[in-house]
Image: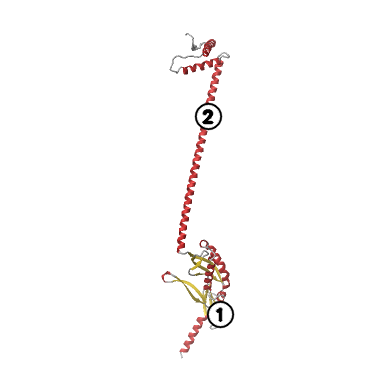
Amino acid sequence: MLILPAVIALLIVYLLGRSVKIIGQAEVIVVERLGRFHRVARSGLNILIPVVERPRHLEVRYTEAGPGGLTRVMSSSTARIDLREQVLNFPSQSVITKDNVTIGIDAVLYYRVVDPQKATYAVQNLPYALETLTRTTLRNIVGEMELDHTLASRDEINRRMREVIEEVSINWGCDVTRVELQAIEPPRDIQASMELQMRAERERRAAVTQAEAGKRAAILEAEGLRESQVRKAEGEREAAILRADGLAQGRLAMAQAEAEAIRRIAAALPEGQAATYLLGLKYLEALPTLAQGKGSTIFLPAEAAGVMGALGGLKELLAKSSGEAGTTSGSRASIPAVPRAIPPGTDQ
């Protein structure tokens, strides 16, 4: 008699456990009534009619670390649909480029369920459908590119994949937020060739940089030499100008002094005799130069006698002029004797 009440109590507890659902934040449950879609149970306390209503289960995929550090993709079913952004990471796949190079590409997909009803009924297995669509789209896009373009165009590949996947995933009730390529792995021989090419390119850049540096240094050295020569030439020119100015000023000063001396001599002598006096002085200044030879006898030309005679007359003229000046000042000027030249062929 006690068994029947216990069975009834257990049945009631079981039905209450199946009918009372507490749904967490950012989670929903698709509720079916008699096998058809009825409503979407939101977060909080939800009560289902036993036997009549039941939650619809979905397939989910997730990754876990396996033995040896390997990552495995696992699948399971759940009645709770997560509305948060989810990450779909699937293993690397082999893709053939336009230039027939097989490379391994590891991609990751970020998506978010926005319509639980479509995600449940529009596609049989949403994660697997997204993964398959991503693989096929990636093969189509990379198959149109060469290897070098593929390695340098990750952003372009991500953008094109997102556009194609998002267009299809809208009908599945999910929104693809991002598609990223985690790694692109060319074959080992291609990697070795790329490393050699990269090393050669770096060596070429280094040689070009060194050549440009040498060229720049030579240009700077030539410009410095030219600048120094220009500065030196300008200095020499300025020095020559200054020397010429000094000589000109000196000669001008000497000419002015000589003109002043001539003016005073002309003022001291009778009118018209200044030229004769200056000519005699120049002649007397030239006599020591003529006497610097080895011989002691000097033969003067016949014209020299006239000059010496003029000097003798100049002596008397100066004596007369000095006498007149002495009468006024009370002093007498002494005039040195003027040597007389002996013309050739005349006895002394």
Q: Is residue 313 above or below residue 162?
A: above
Q: Residue at x 54, y 23 (%)?
A: 255
Occupied quadrant, residue 163: bottom right
Q: Residue at x 49, y 40 (%)?
A: 225
Which residue occupies the foreground of this view, 139 or 11? 139
Q: Which residue is mark 2?
A: 244
**Residue at (55, 20) in percent of width and height:** 260
The x and y percentages for residue 233 are 51, 36
Q: Which mark is residue 88?
A: none
Report the amino acid beneath label 2.
Answer: Ala
User: Mark 1, mark 2: which one is toward the viewer?
Assistant: 2
The residue lying furthest to the left in this view is 68
Give the x, y percent position of residue 132: 52, 71
Q: Residue 48, can we see it?
A: no
| Residue 155 shows in the view | yes
Going by the numbered disc 1, the residue's amino acid type is Glu
- Local packing at callout 1 (Cα closer than 10 Å; few below 14, some 14-19, many 20+) is some
Estimate the x, y position of residue 147 in percent, counting from the top left: 51, 62
Task: Check disc 2: other Cα within 10 Å, few if <14, some if 14-19, many if 20+.
Answer: few
Q: Eyeballing the image, is 138 above or below 58?
A: above
Q: Is residue 167 left or right of residue 183?
A: right
Please tell me which residue lies in front, 126 or 199: 199
Q: Secondary structure at mark 2?
A: helix
The percent coordinates of residue 219 (x first, y second) are 50, 44
Along the viewing direction, whichever of 202 and 227 lies nearer the viewer:
202
Instruction: Name the residue carrying label 1.
Output: 32
Foreground: 250 or 160? 160
